[in-house]
């Protein structure tokens, strides 16, 4: 092989075959990448300008994903094989045709020392000059003895051309690496901008200097929800215009990067050519050793370039892949948000339809009916209509509204409650929420401390559990809030159903009472009905508002929780702070599991504290009861003060009459304790009916049975008997025998019973027993007011004794049911052991505080008025009341409970007495409300000043209920004249009232008299 070349030929050849080709290859490589990116950016920019930003960015992400996947595959292939770079492979191909070594004549400059040479090189050049001079002298001497002339000897250098060229061309990696840095940096910025738009364009991230405090449905602050969220500066939020500008600038930046690379490559190639030219002069001389370009040196340099470039590429691919995954995660998250929003909007619409179809629409129809009825009653006031015509018109409207309420409100609501329709709807919604998150990535890579200005970029990647966090956030923020046990839909619907039934009662009561108006009442029936319709309308509007508020509450809570939960997650994604993400996850885990030791301690301490309080209360109660027993035995027990300030009897009765007279007509009728109680106002005790049913079944099976019904006057004994006749005693004929006045002679009692049983020939109880036993048909006989079948006299018990004998002898043939006042019954039991003659006993008084409350409020609600309880000084100073001062509903609930507890205690379970005290508690009323004073029981002066004769007389009236003056004379063992004077005096003072069958105690002061007699030990 010819190794002789001229330096000029080599440089010319290198310029044509290597340098230009290599530079063109690098330019082409960069241009292809630039063009590819430019095309993508241009298309994206065009789509953004056309208003298709979301679609354009999704397409960009898909395209970039393909690029990165290919790059990742290339890196994986390189890791399996020897690492290489495309431009290095091309460099090897270009230089493979170059000679490994060439010999070039040394230039004259290689012999002359210059100022920049080191001493070693200067010395070497001196030696070279000396050597060359010696060669020239020797050559000249030799030429004398040889024929012909010879040229002077040429000093040559051995140049490893191929390695030398590769060595210097490897320096081209610097502009390539710088270009890649700028190129990938631009890609990263595009991905970051895409991610920012994806999150911010959803509207989930807002610039809020201070997050709003979240509250529970009960109005209390929700401290658990106080989680700091990252603030987002307004200039960091890209809008449509920002996106258009960004991609326009990105295209320009890409072109600038390419141009900058072209210039840098040109400069670098010029430097390489200069260095190659210099190396061709010095390599193989004392200045540059040929060993500097040995094969191993080239291999090492290639490896260095490959390693450094590979590290850069891996770093860039790692961060770009992470940013790409971040974009994908944001896109998936926003897709979840859109799907969830669509589902929640559908659920919201479903809730709205549920409330509208089942409540608001039929309620609005009823509202129109009420308004129509009110207008008609108003028009009728100016027309002359007979009472019958008014009644027919009233009944027509009543029937229409009643049917509408029953068919379109009460019955459908009952079915909704029974089938738990709303609860099922909520359960389905909340149980589907965990399924929403299944398409979310299980793990997410968060990018922290990202610095793109450094080459390679610096960053930290942290993996977090993303899917579980999304699941927990949605579960805690949405699912838990809408589970049926939190919303309590059936409880709410039951309340609405009660309200609707109350409206039905208002309509029924007012129209019925309007029909009962007499001329003597000085009331306009049309005005009564019209006012009733107005109150029913007001109540209905309140119920409509209640349903609408519940619907709005659920709708607003759904919107709020949707925004809160997804905003929280969006801000965590936006900020990319791994500590906040993990902290949020830990917070929701803590909420779900309650593993915090403080919470456990609080729970245990609360349980211990509760047990301690219960034990202390129990111990105090026991000690107090023992103290009361001992104090009573020793005689120093304090008398319980139930009364307030005393008042004059006349004042008390006058105030009571004025109070009753000042009430609206509808209220007077509803709380008329002298009127027979309607079934709908009766307070049922299911155990009483069960007891009677059981006894009735035993009697039907030939087991001797008899019933006693005992209760104070006005406690509802007559109504209870009527209900028994209608509901229980339906298989046999029922005969009612009433003793309205006192009859104590056996023949009178026999006559009354014989008349009821239609027995003609019975003159004595023996005749009566025989006649009953001859009858084949079994019947039920009700004896009302048996306390009137005796008189408290030595000879006044014969009739009662024989009546008891009759009952015991015929209790197989006849089911005897006897009713009596409580105090008369207790007296008879002490004298005659009357209780032993009856197998089953029922008490109609002794209502509990809850039953007294139900008794009063049933009537009140039927009036259509609202209630407001007023607080006295004691209540205002009470700690329990003070806790609810900021909550009107709870404070009213407290005052109501306090009032009815006292009312039940003072009325001793008597319904009539409770109604009297209720009326006296009314402070005032307006068109919509009744204002109730705190319960205060005032003692009556006159009753406290009763003498012994008066007390004896009143005790007799308590026992017998009704007596004439003659019968009173027999009871208190005074002359008829004195008894008449006593009864008349008590009657003139309104302590007694005179009726058809004699005198009886005034019901308005019945409780005060009974209490006075108890305290004086006249009755027990």
Image (cartoon, grey):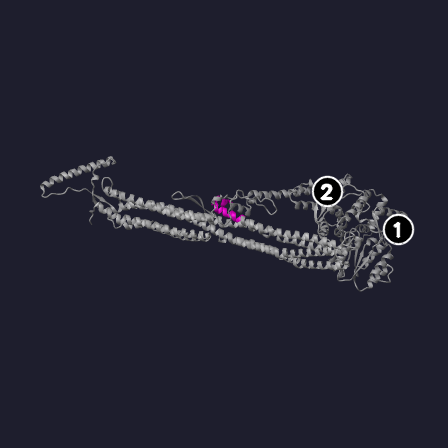
Element at label 2: helix
Quadrant in the rendering for residue 934: top right
In-front residue for pair 247/195: 247
Q: Nearer the viewer, mark 1 or mark 2?
A: 1
| Residue 496 visible in the snapshot | yes
Range of residues picked out in magenta: 564-583
Instruction: Report the Cα–Cα distance between label 1 and label 2.
Output: 46 Å
Q: Main secondary structure of the magenta part?
A: helix
Q: Which residue is mark 1?
A: 966
Say which mark, if any, is on residue 625: 2
In this view, the residue in front, 77 or 6, is 6
Disc on the earlier residue, 1 or 2: 2
Question: Does 655 appear in magenta?
Answer: no
User: Left or right: where does residue 505 sit relative to residue 185?
Assistant: right
Q: Position of residue 477 (x, y in %)?
A: 55, 49
Residue 264 placement, left or right of 139 = right
Cβ–Cβ below 8 Å for labels 1 and 2? no
User: Residue 617, percent across and down?
Assistant: 68, 42
* Picture layout, residue 771 above or below residue 126: below
What is the tally of numbered marks visible in this picture? 2
Q: Nearer the viewer, residue 48 or 224?
A: 48
Specify the quadrant of the image occupied by residue 799.
Answer: bottom right
Label 1 crowd (10 A; few <14 / some 14-19 / many >=20): some
Specify the farthest residue to the front: 382
Q: Residues within 10 Å of mark 2 (few under 14, many from 20)?
A: few
Residue at image coords 51%, 52%: 337
Q: Residue at x 23, y 44 (%)?
A: 159
């Amino acid at each position: 092989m010819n190794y002789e070349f001229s330096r000029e030929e080599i440089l010319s050849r290198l310029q044509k075959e290597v340098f230009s080709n290599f530079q063109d290859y690098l330019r082409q490589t960069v241009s292809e990448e630039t063009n590819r990116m430019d095309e993508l950016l241009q298309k994206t920019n065009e789509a953004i300008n056309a208003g298709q930003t979301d679609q354009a960015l999704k397409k960009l992400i898909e395209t970039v994903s393909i690029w990165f996947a290919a790059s990742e595959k290339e890196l994986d292939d390189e890791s399996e094989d020897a690492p290489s770079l495309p431009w290095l492979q091309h460099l090897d191909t270009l230089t493979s045709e170059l000679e490994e070594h060439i010999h070039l004549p040394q230039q004259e400059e290689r012999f002359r020392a210059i100022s920049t040479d080191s001493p070693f090189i200067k010395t070497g050049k001196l030696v070279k000059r000396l050597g060359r001079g010696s060669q020239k002298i020797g050559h000249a001497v030799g030429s004398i003895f040889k024929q012909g002339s010879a040229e002077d000897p040429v000093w040559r250098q051995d140049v490893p051309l191929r390695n030398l060229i590769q060595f210097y061309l490897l320096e081209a990696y610097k502009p390539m690496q710088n270009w890649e840095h700028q190129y990938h940096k631009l890609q990263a910025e595009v991905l970051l901008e895409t991610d920012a738009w994806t999150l911010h364009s959803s509207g989930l991230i807002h610039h809020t200097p201070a997050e709003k405090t979240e509250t529970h449905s009960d109005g209390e602050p929700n401290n658990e929800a106080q989680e700091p969220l990252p603030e987002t500066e307004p200039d960091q939020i890209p809008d449509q215009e920002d996106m258009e500008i960004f991609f326009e600038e990105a295209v320009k930046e890409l072109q600038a990067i390419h141009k900058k690379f072209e210039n840098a490559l040109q400069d670098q190639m010029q430097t390489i050519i200069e260095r190659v030219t210099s190396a061709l002069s010095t390599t193989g001389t004392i200045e540059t050793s040929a060993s500097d370009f040995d094969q191993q040196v080239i291999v090492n340099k290639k490896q260095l370039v490959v390693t450094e470039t590979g590290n850069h590429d891996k770093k860039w691919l790692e961060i770009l892949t992470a940013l790409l995954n971040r974009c994908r995660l944001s896109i998936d998250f926003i897709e979840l948000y859109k799907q969830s929003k669509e589902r929640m909007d559908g659920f919201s619409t479903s809730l709205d339809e549920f409330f509208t179809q089942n409540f608001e629409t039929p309620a609005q129809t009823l509202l129109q009916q009420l308004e129509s009825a009110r207008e008609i009653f108003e028009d009728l006031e100016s027309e002359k209509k007979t009472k019958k015509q008014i009644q027919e018109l009233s009944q027509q409207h009543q029937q229409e509204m009643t049917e509408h309420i029953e068919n379109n409100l009460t019955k459908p609501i009952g079915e909704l409650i029974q089938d738990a329709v709303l609860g099922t709807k909520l359960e389905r919604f909340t149980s589907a929420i965990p399924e929403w998150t299944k398409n979310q990535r299980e793990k997410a890579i968060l990018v922290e401390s990202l610095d793109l200005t450094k080459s390679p970029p610096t960053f930290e990647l942290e993996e977090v559990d993303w899917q579980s966090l999304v699941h927990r956030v949605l579960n805690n923020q949405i699912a838990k809030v809408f589970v049926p046990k939190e919303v309590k839909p059936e409880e709410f619907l039951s309340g609405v159903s009660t309200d609707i039934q109350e409206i039905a009662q208002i309509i029924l009561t007012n129209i019925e009472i309007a029909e009962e108006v007499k001329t003597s009442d000085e009331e306009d029936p049309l005005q009564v009905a019209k006012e009733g319709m107005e109150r029913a309308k007001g109540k209905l509007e309140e119920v409509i508002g209640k349903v609408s508020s519940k619907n709005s509450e659920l709708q607003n809570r759904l919107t709020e929780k949707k925004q809160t939960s997804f905003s929280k997650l969006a801000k965590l994604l936006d900020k990319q702070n791994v500590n906040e993400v993990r902290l949020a996850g830990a917070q929701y885990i803590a909420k779900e599991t309650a593993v915090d030791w403080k919470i456990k301690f609080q729970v245990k301490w609360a349980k211990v504290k509760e047990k301690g309080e219960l034990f202390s209360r129990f111990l105090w109660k026991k000690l107090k009861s023992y103290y009361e027993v001992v104090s009573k035995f020793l005689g120093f027990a304090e008398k319980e003060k139930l009364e307030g300030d005393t008042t004059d009897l006349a004042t008390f009765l006058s105030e009571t009459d004025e109070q009753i007279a000042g009430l609206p007509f509808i209220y007077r009728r509803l709380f008329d304790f002298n009127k027979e109680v309607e079934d709908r106002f009766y307070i049922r005790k299911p155990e009483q009916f069960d007891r009677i049913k059981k006894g009735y079944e035993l009697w039907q099976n030939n087991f001797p049975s008899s019933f006693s019904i005992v209760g104070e006057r006005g406690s509802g004994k007559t109504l209870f008997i009527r209900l028994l006749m209608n509901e229980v005693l339906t298989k046999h004929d029922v005969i009612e025998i009433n003793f309205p006045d006192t009859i104590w002679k056996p023949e009178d009692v026999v006559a009354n019973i014989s008349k009821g049983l239609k027995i003609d020939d019975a003159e004595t109880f023996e005749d009566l027993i025989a006649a009953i036993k001859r009858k084949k048909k079994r019947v039920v006989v009700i004896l009302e007011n048996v306390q009137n079948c005796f008189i408290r006299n030595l000879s006044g018990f014969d009739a009662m004794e024989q009546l008891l004998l009759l009952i015991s002898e015929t209790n197989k043939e006849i089911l005897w049911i006897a009713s009596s006042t409580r105090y008369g019954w207790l007296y008879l039991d002490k004298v005659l052991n009357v209780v032993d003659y009856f197998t089953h006993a029922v008490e109609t008084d002794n209502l509990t505080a809850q039953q007294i409350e139900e008794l009063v409020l049933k009537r009140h609600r039927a009036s259509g008025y609202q209630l407001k309880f007023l607080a006295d000084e004691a209540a205002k100073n009470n700690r329990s009341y003070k806790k609810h001062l900021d909550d009107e509903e709870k404070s009213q609930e407290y005052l109501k409970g306090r009032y009815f507890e006292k009312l039940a205690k003072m009325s001793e379970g008597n319904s009539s007495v409770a109604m009297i005290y209720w009326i006296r508690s009314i402070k005032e009323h307006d068109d919509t409300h009744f204002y109730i004073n705190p319960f205060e029981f005032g003692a009556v002066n006159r009753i406290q000043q009763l003498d012994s004769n008066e007390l004896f007389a009143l005790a007799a009236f308590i026992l017998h209920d009704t007596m004439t003056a003659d019968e009173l004379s027999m009871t208190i063992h005074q002359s008829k004249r004195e008894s008449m004077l006593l009864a008349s005096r008590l009657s003139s003072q309104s302590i007694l009232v005179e009726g058809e069958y004699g005198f009886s105690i005034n019901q308005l002061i019945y409780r005060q008299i009974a209490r006075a007699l108890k305290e004086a030990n006249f009755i027990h």
